[in-house]
Image: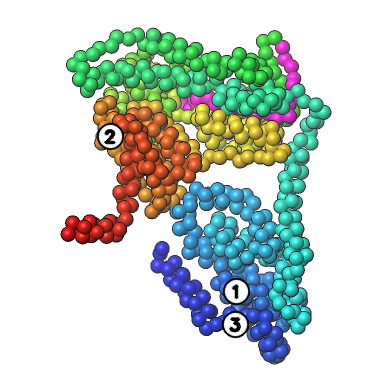
Amino acid sequence: MTSSRLALLAFIAALIAAFFIFDLQNYLTLEALKAQQTAIETYRSNHPGMAVAIYALIYIAVTGLSLPGAAILTLAGGAVFGLLWGTVIVSFASSIGATLAFLAARFLFRDAVKARFGERLQAIDAGVAKEGALYLFTLRLVPVFPFFVINLAMGLTNLKTQTFYWVSQVGMLAGTLVYVNAGTQLGQLESLSGILSPGLIGSFVLLGIFPLIANKIVDTLKADKIYVNWPKPARFDNNIVVIGGGSGGLVTSYIAAAVKAKVTLIEKHKMGGDCLNTGCVPSKALIRSAKLLSHIQRSADFGIKKADAEFDFAEVMNRVQAVIKTVEPHDSVQRYSDLGVNVIEGEAKILSPWEVQVTTDSETRTMTTRTIVIAAGARPLVPPIPGIEDIDYLTSDNIWALHELPKRLLVLGGGPIGCELAQSFARFGSKVTQVEMLPRLLIREDTDVSDIVMAKFRQEGIDVLVEHTAKQFIIENGEKILIAEHQDQEVRIAFDQVLLSIGRIANTQGYGLEEVGVELSPKRTIAINDFQETNYPNIFAVGDVSGPFQFTHTAAHQAWYAAVNALFGGFKKFKTDYSVIPWATFIEPEVARVGLNEQDAKEQNIAYEVSTYHLDDLDRAITDGEAHGFVKVLTQPGKDKILGVTIVGEHAGDLLAEFVLAMKHGLGLNKILGTIHIYPTMAEANKYVAGVWKRNHAPQGLLRCVKKFHDWRRG
């Protein structure tokens, strides 16, 4: 805590201490007020201006310091100044005092709370930014809630000061009137409990609930207004129509069919989407073949004097297609038809919030539906680099059609897809040059992760060029060349084929979004709320087309919420839970992460501790010849609560699962340390990193006492 904060805290503590040391609270009782009423009124008659100033300052001080006595002071306002002026003075004094308490709490404690509860506070701040004024107004209307608690709690949020002030003044007005009016009848009051009868408290509660009900009514009216130009059918052919047969669409359909809803799934290309056909499945099949080659090249590391491999790249790519064919039945039309899904292979177009047109090879027809779930996926981004139209470029969509290994492959992009394919093609024998405009590969990971990956890539012969910006493609004397800029210098990179891997763009065109008026986000994805709803409450979106994550497993995760909210949202809706999202990059060394890493924690100003266990110390990693990488865990300072985990090394994605489970269910490192792990396995690394944390938090004082006890036992 800074010196200015300490000084303010000490000053406030001194004032509060003085209040109680000098028994000033005895002056703020109903008996004291009634006893001094005549004297106070006489002073007010002789010095009206000074009386108002003194009264207001006392009221501001009491509320600003969160001291007991505000209720008595409000009664005094009515008794001394009457209903009108008493209400005016109390209204402003109480609002000013509350705002001072609000600001003091923010200045003294918000940074510390943010550092300790960063993720939770972010969620609260998001809610406050959206409807904070409404909730504050509701709380102010109900005097059951202690106002000083509200002042301090709101100070820890991101609510604007001016919003806090005016909402407080308006919200507290009803309660102020009741107390000031009671003060005008001070002589008849026997106790404070006589002011707020059960009936009056009930009225306040109803008054407090009213804004929430009104807000829901407004939301409903807004939702109804968007449908004004779209006649709603009397009957529906479907409960849900799902557009897109990738991970998000398949899971949505599966859940809907499982609860016996009538669901139609429309896929215009291939069932399984990008993951099966052009993403996860083919890339991992390719990576597996490339990894086998790398192990043969490392035969000496395993005690094998010499090992050679003869391969045909075309056969490797044939294996990739064979793997796709093997997995294909899991996502097939037949399987989902058997599950009760009406699968249509055709092109969908949304005609209205209730109607979807389907065009197949044989017909075009329109079906009605209560809800629509859009799972249209994304496609590789093709950057507007001059000359790119003259280059027969590759993307993660069409690279699987290759049957001849490129001699010189240029990979544009240093994200997960670019890294996975760059390493694989280098292991098959391509001369790979990887160009990234940012300072390092895998920019979302910590610097130590990027350093390990780049060192490994360069060791394997990949020419990694960071801080190189692609400027132009040219063909010179029949040779393809990328002109890039590095530190204000032109760099020319010759290549035979280029792989574009700089991101993906949501598929939001060609199926009626613009015509119907489904809104897009600034990132050109479909804009959704916490329930996967678009601006049309009966149209939902999941997966890459909506974000915020572009992973197969997050699309499936969102699909559960979309399906349940679409079918049962009229009774109960569920907010999508993004609290624990894992991911992995399947290079060597493998990189996996869940939750915060160090750069995220620093950017969000979240305090953390780091426990790191290096895999070169792990028995199984040593026996397997994979003694490299680390397990790094971020925890709350002084506690074993896990904020995030990064693993670099063999089977990192598999090892991460234990931490994902722990974070999801609130288990700390002590629980992992107390769990038996099979020896010798890579999973022991999870236990050992928990041991690192435990050693760093060993109770040194207790251990010194125990040492003395053992010394005494030895005589």
Residue 134 drawn above or below residue 50 = above
Task: Give the label on residue 26, or none.
Answer: 3
Q: What's under tag 3, amino acid-wise?
A: Asn
Res 262 seen here: yes
Give the alpha-carbon distance from disc 1 to disc 3, as whole Å: 10 Å
Looking at the rendered structure, the kind of residue marked 2 is Leu
Disc sitting over residue 17 in the figure: none
**Res 76 quadrant in image:** bottom right
Please report whichever mark, 1 or 3, sits nearer to the chain's N-terminal start. 3
The residue indicated by pointer 1 is 68
Q: Quadrant of the N terminus?
A: bottom left
Tell me the mark number nearer the camera, choosing from 2 and 1: 2
Tell me if I can see residue 469 in this picture. no
Give coordinates of residue 138: x percent, y percent: 69, 58
Residue pictured at 76% horizontal, 83% vertical: 187
Q: Nearer the viewer, residue 337 or 678?
A: 678
Q: Residues within 10 Å of mark 1 (few under 14, many from 20)?
A: some
